[in-house]
Amino acid sequence: MSGSEHVLHPSPAAAPGATGSLRPAALWLKAALAAAFLAYVLNCLAGTTADPDLWGFLAFGRLFWHSPSFPYEDVFSFTPTLKPWIYHEWLSGVIFYPLYTAFGAPGLQTLKYLLGLATVGLLYAAARLRGAHPLAVLVTFLPLLPQFINFYHPLRPQVFTFFFLALLLLVLERARLTGRFRPLFLFPLVMVAWANLHGGFLAGLGVLLLYGVGEALSRRPAWPYFLTLALGTLATLINPYGLAYWKFMAYVADAGTWLDPYYLRLMQEADLVLML
């Protein structure tokens, strides 16, 4: 071998199998982070304290299932109430009661876990659709999730609003980015269930309005959003009370029933998590 010849040794990075050995390690790291985050979410959802409202939901559900007709009269109040008695969360009670009678508290807890995990999953999917890095999404959730979970202790009808709002955000983002509006046009069907489960359906209509205005200002097609908004608004009239439901919602908002400072702060924090 002459002095001008050099023996070439492969670098560690170029060694056969080196790249392949890194891939399993990266996959294990991702799996560990996902498992840790899942455990964190489940821990946040693990509360079992019930407040008096839960028994109210169950009482209405019992009244519904054991009455020959829809209960339009408040049989629980000692003082006279408005007629007809408009219980805007009526469908939630109708779902909660048979779950509780059939499976007890674990049945309600299971529903809470399923809706909570699904909501977080939808929010994660919406963030990823917008190009967010997975780690950035998880880090954003860590400090905010405990406040968002406040409405899951105990199981409350708000969990349906959070689930549907997260679903709507994902559908809206997909429609905005791809120009495919068919799933968006199906959302009025969801509004029928949402309006009967919880009065927070108004947030969904508000988000649709914001997206429509935003697309119009950006000189992109806005008519699909406004059409869905119009159809979704009409869909909310499919309820046991008809137009009186909307009059009740206006009355409640004007009376400030939902403007308790503590409750309002919790709602603001939950909304912040959803928008982020």
Image: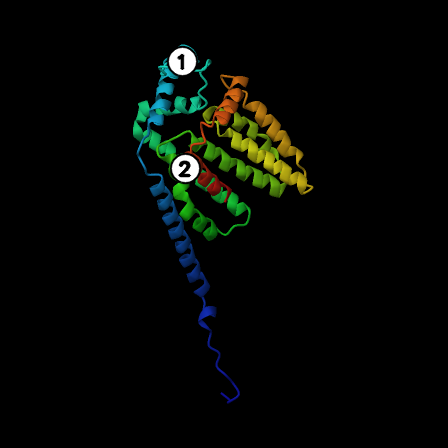
Q: Amino acid at mark 1?
A: Pro
Image: 132 above or below 155 = below
Foreground residue among 262 and 41: 262
Q: How is the image coloured?
A: rainbow
- The mark nearer the N terminus, 1 or 2, is 1
Residue ID at (49%, 33%)? 164
Number of numbered markers = 2
In the visual, does 216 lie left or right of 263?
A: right
The three-letter amino acid code for the residue at tag 2 is Gly
Q: Residue furthest right?
A: 219
Disc 2: which residue? 116
Residue that protrudes farthest toward the bottom in the picture: 3
- Mark 1 = which residue? 80
Mark 2 Cα within 10 Å, few/some/many (few <14, many 20+)? Answer: many
User: Which is nearer the eye, 44 or 75?
Assistant: 75
Asked whether, in this view, residue 103 is left or right of residue 3, the answer is left
Question: Is any atom of residue 193 visible in this view?
Answer: no
Q: Quadrant of residue 269?
A: top left
Residue 110 spot, x, y in % from top left: 35, 33
Residue 16 % position (x, y): 45, 67
For numbered disc 1, what is the local secondary structure? Answer: loop
24 w.r.t. 58: above or below = below
Residue 52 visible (yes or no): yes
Residue at 54%, 23% in the rendered image: 236
Distance of mark 1 from mark 2, alpha carbons? 37 Å
* Quadrant of the image occupied by residue 95: top left
In the image, residue 196 sits, relative to residue 180, either above or below, namely: above
For label 2, the SS is helix
